[in-house]
Amino acid sequence: MTPSHLKMFGKENAMPEITKGVYFIPGQDEFIPDSHVYVIGMPTSQDLSIVDAGLMGKGGYKIQSVQKLGIKLLDIKRIIMTHTHLDHIGCLKEIRAQIPQAELWIHEEEAYPIERGDERGVYGMEMFRSMCQSQYGLKPGDFKFKVDRKLKEGEKLDIGGLSWEVLHIPGHSAGSIALYDRSRKVLIPGDVVYADYAIGRFDLHGADGAVLKNSLLRLAELEVEVLLPGHNRVVKGVKPGYIRDTAKQWAPYLE
Ligand SMILES: [Zn+2]
Ligand SMILES: [Zn+2]
């Protein structure tokens, strides 16, 4: 989840390839935000991954955007979730209907609840759940999925001709992960840290401010040149110390 007053700017839409083998499909926010999607993998590898899905109703747009990149749906081998909030998992079912061969990979902390049909972490709070269920006609069990691979801290994913480290960075949600390409200094942090000194909220089910602070400090140790968050602006040419400065600004609120 993210503050909805921050909107995408159109500029990035014109340049969907952020860097070799990393493609950007901007979210289309409604009154609830729609997460960005990143497609990762070298186009010739035929081993591509989608990172996150998005809001309910946005599956068709995301799939069309993938096709517009010239990517064959059959080459998409998996969907990796940075975490399972509604604005990321909402259209997962729609997307999977178009790419049934794709596996689903989620960090173990959120994979088990998703497999059990425990949707507290999806909706984040009870009031939001009842609002969304009436607004979108959602039913209990709509976000129950079998998870093909339960990701763990420190795993190395050599996929699509690229190499990504899985970093478990809880605090925004229990099973939030970042994907980090160390050699190219590319970070996909989900909703943990955004551009413009913003961070993810830490008041929902499974969230914890003090834990989020530690996760931010951990990300601050990384060299990051390309920051690809779940919402709002993407940043190429991140200035050194950016995540550390962000963590410092928020530290008093994260106890
Ligand atoms: Zn989000
Ligand atoms: Zn989130």
Image (tube, grey):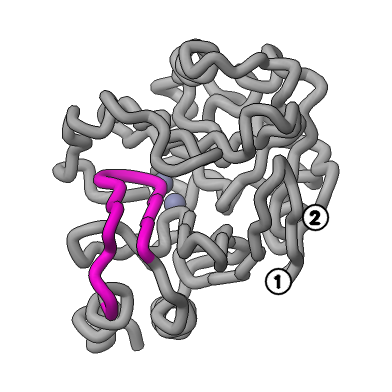
Q: Position of residue 74 (x, y in %)?
A: 75, 16
- Find the distance from the CA under tag 2 to the CA under tag 1: 10 Å
In which quarter of the view is residue 24 placed? Answer: top left
Q: Position of residue 190 (x, y in %)?
A: 47, 54
Residue 207 against residue 49 in the figure, above or below: below
Q: For the residue labelled by badge 2, is the local secondary structure a helix, a strand or a loop?
A: strand
Look at the image and tell me whether residue 31 can be seen.
yes
In which quarter of the view is residue 112 placed? Answer: bottom right
Quadrant of the snapshot with the C terminus: bottom left
Instruction: Residue at 71% x, 41% y: name it.
Output: 160
Q: Position of residue 130 (x, y in %)?
A: 45, 35
For residue 237: magenta?
Answer: yes
Question: Is 47 in front, or is 26?
Answer: 47
Instruction: Residue at 18% x, 60% y: name it.
Output: 196
Question: Is 79 in front, or is 161?
Answer: 161
Q: Which residue is mark 2?
A: 150
Dot 1 crowding, Cα within 10 Å, few <14, some 14–19, many 20+ = some
What amino acid does circle 1 point to?
Glu
Instruction: Residue at 62% x, 20% y: name it.
Output: 95
Label for residue 153? 1
Q: Is mark 1 within 8 Å of ligand 2?
A: no
Label for residue 219? none
Instruction: Residue at 70% x, 45% y: name it.
Output: 161
In which quarter of the view is residue 172 placed? Answer: bottom left
Answer with left or right where residue 4 lies relative to residue 102.
left
What amino acid does circle 2 point to?
Lys
Residue 253 against residue 141 in the figure, above or below: below
Q: Which residues are magenta?
A: 225-241
Q: For the residue labelled by badge 1, is the local secondary structure a helix, a strand or a loop?
A: loop
Secondary structure mostly seen in the magenta stretch: loop
Cβ–Cβ below 8 Å for labels 2 and 1? Answer: no
